[in-house]
Amino acid sequence: MNRSVERHRNVLDFALSSLLRRKGKNVSLWVVYTLIVSLIAAIVFYTHALKREAALILQGAPDIVVQKMVAGRHDLVPVGYVEKIAAIRGVRSVRPRLWGYYYDAATGANYTLMASDDPLPGPGAADIGSGVARTLHLTEGDFLPIRATDGTPTLFQVRKVLPYASELASSDLILLSEGDLRALFDFPRGFATDLAVTVGNPAERPTIAAKIAGQFPDSRPILNSEILRTYDSIFDWRGGMMVVMLGVAVLAFVIFAWDKATGLSAEERREIGILKSVGWETGDVLLLKFWEGAAISLAAFLCGTILAYIQVFFLSASLFEPALKGWSVLYPRFKLVPDVDPYQLAVLFFLTVVPYTVATIIPSWRAATVDPDAAMRS
Amino acid sequence: MIALHDVTKSFHSGKANPFTAIRNISLTIAPARLTVLKGPSGSGKTTLLTLIGCMARPTSGRIVLSGNGISGFPGGEEIRELDITSLPERFLAGIRRATFGFIFQHFNLLRGITVLENVMLPAYPTGERHGEIRKRAEELLALFDVARHANSRVDLLSGGETQRVAIARALINRPSVIVADEPTAHLDTDLSREFMEIVGSFKSDGKTVLIASHDPLVCESPRVDTVVEMRDGRILRSGSVP
Amino acid sequence: MTLHPAVLALLVASLLIGGMVLYAGGYGAKILLRWDIGSGSERQLELERRTYLISTLLSVAFALQILSLFLFVFTADRLHGMFSGAMCAAGTLNVNGFGYPVLVLKIVTFLLAGLWLVVNHADTRGYDYPLIKPKYALLLLLGPLVLVEGYLQYRYFAGLHPEVITSCCGSLFGQGQKGIAGDLAALPAGPMEGAFFGGMAATMACGIRFRRTGRGGYLFSIASSATFAVALASMISFICLYIYELPTHHCPFCILQKEYGYVGYILYVALFGGGVAGMGVGVLMPFRRRGSMARVVPALQRRLTGGTLVLYLLFTLIVAYRILFSPFRLAAG
């Protein structure tokens, strides 16, 4: 066992000095390798972090949202449903929600207008999300014009800009008092946009949703978990698409690596010939090539992941944002929480180090099977 | 002792340019003696050296090692006689590493590394501790009076110093057989004489020495015990020098 | 199909593995037909050079296969959120008919790949390549299995559509369920505990005896393999209950999740590692005295036996710790 360890140590020693002896070739390989790792790592990290953010935000969302459907389209739900749903066993509370979309022609952006639960903001005042503030260049105290359904613009004074920390959830939000909202949209009394249902035991949510749908055939209960699942799917899908596209880059890298490994310079050939004639056997030279590859892979993997980490979590992944976040006029600005786990690293390993290693097996073998007597003959 | 029985080595058989380097050679290399292979280039000396030195396998025939000097083979301590004809490369290399030390015509030292590392190289795959290999290498360099160059690059040495480093490298694994291919081809008379003196010291250490050369300084040296004359892949004459 | 990066990684891995195995199999066939260690012809020398390449390719392929078993299970676990009704890997695997077959095949190829690596290790230490024919014969068996598994894995992932509702492990591994999962869960805990600890003790005893005296190699191998099977069944039958501290939660996949400290990974790595090593001892037994192997195999078998003993001991200790220190108590019987 000890001999084996010492052998590895000696060969590794020589492998490192070999790499340094051919700086040009190995540095260029390392740079390209690092780039590939960092590109794929950025996608993996970003996708994972987005999913995590979505999950965190949805934790605050209602367990079940009940909407009413008319001819397959979302309609206003009668507040009378509240009592009957609250009576279902397992339901902790039911709260009618009042909200809608508002399209601002001037900026081309869609905002979400919502009635606040609190007494604040009071009549004539609005709390706005930071995305709204940015797009309309508003701060506290400014006036925000909103057109009612009859076309008359009403001015609301901005009481508060919602904190940056809730950016993902509230970026496009405008909070008004219930009275103002009903007046603006001409909301009929006794109706709400949807109902937010809180359920005590998470395991019972699907059953309760089924009961609601049974009691009110015209309703559509949407589970929190379904929303989360949809977001997960989208992020995964988008992330996967990008990885597939980067597959071309990985392929190019693999061919590049193969080429570097096959193109032994005359000096390298001479060296291996000498090694074999002084007593290194094929297995030893293969081990040498393995350690060379491992050293470069480790260096590239480390640097690539660190680069990606910085890019995603400190520089907000400007390269990939559009593809991963989707198209919109209004983007929430947010810093993702760094969250890298061994699983992501394992996936990264499979997508980068493994293709590299496989591509260099045959060239390494060819280099290693030089005849020992080659040095005698040259 | 190394015995060859009816050994033939051919290349490229079945292809466009088949060529037989050695034909039906039978030969015994005596232990602790200096044997010289003499002959013009193309006579098969180098091929014969590679076969004896466990660098290549014969196309036909048998090669048998015997005696106390066999090392590097698992269980070798108990083996008195070993037929190495069909040994796979791994084992052949193990034996070669431990039993044979090679000195090449062009010295064949690695250019990018230090003299000390060059000497240590053959011992790396044995699994010996790095520190111990280093110590032995330093002792060998001191023995051949090139210790002061231990950390220099090989290109900076003179011809004679390079030769002595090459010899030190050949001795790092404490081999019982030294094989040299045209060792004096690039040396002047003084250095050649020096080389033969070092060979003499090998003999007194009980090592077997095998040299392929057509240099009269080597072939006619008083230290030579046996001369084997070769031509066109066959032995013309083989005899002890009285 | 879901394009999760991990899924892509697994598909790429199985493509690479398949490619390497096919290439190696091609040359393996050549070797089986034309190998002649006694010959010094150039063709034989070329074949001997090739064996280095094939050995390397297959070692990498099988190491990758082993890693991809873990990545597969981990991914199935991670994806459970996408399928309504799935709480852990059990649900994800049940989404379409390919999930469990892929898992079973991956386990089988893991074991066979491990065995191949053991035989290859022994063969390369012998000075006359004594095991070369059995080795490549094993490859002829293993190769197609790997390719089939790769194909099924592709079909599995291609058939993963996130909207599908699948069963939670509670209904899959519940005691009343029909099917093998339910049967395993319904095995009475008391006798299973006895079988498990008894099997472990027997394996340890045989292993120690084999290491000391060199006798009873087959017995040890059989004992360790049987214990492997019993331990797997025990995981579902009672071990998981102690980890979850619930009398009805039998699922063997949920222990892989974070809330249980990822203890599932340690348990499975220990069990599978020990199982492969124990089987390796048995596979090498017929060659124990054959020529050059007489020098190599006994030492190798001792190391493998040691490995099994250590890993099984680790497994047993973790299980015993859980049983002794968990506030959960199974009713007698």
Image (cartoon, rainbow, N blue to C red):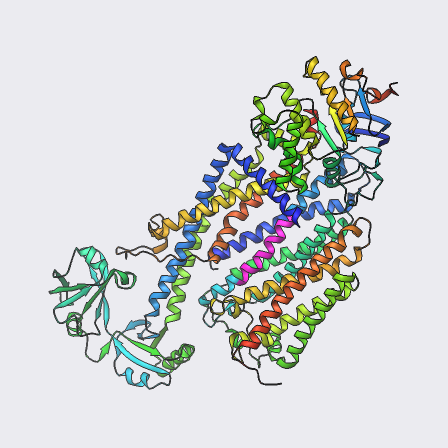
Q: Nearer the viewer, residue C196 or B118?
A: B118
* A2 relative to B241, above or below: below
| Residue C46 position within the rendered picture, expressed as x and y whole percent measured from the top left | 73, 37
Query: Does residue C283 appear left or right of residue C75 in this picture?
Result: right
Query: Does residue A153 appear left or right of residue C26 in this picture?
Result: left
Point 74% across, 44% down: residue: C30
Q: Is residue C64 magenta?
A: yes
The answer to whether residue A259 is visible is no
Query: What's drawn in magenta, residue-wise?
Result: C57-73
Instruction: Name the magenta segment's main secondary structure.
Output: helix
Q: Is residue A293 magenta?
A: no
* C208 relative to A377, above or below: below
Q: Nearer the viewer, residue A200 or A331?
A: A200
Instruction: Give the image quarter of residue C114.
Output: bottom right
Point 24% across, 60% down: residue: A110
| Residue A323 position within the rendered picture, expressed as x and y whole percent measured from the top left | 36, 52
Instruction: Give the image quarter of residue A185.
Output: bottom left
| Residue C192 position within the rendered picture, expressed as x and y whole percent measured from the top left | 65, 78
| Residue B61 position within the rendered picture, expressed as x and y whole percent measured from the top left | 85, 33
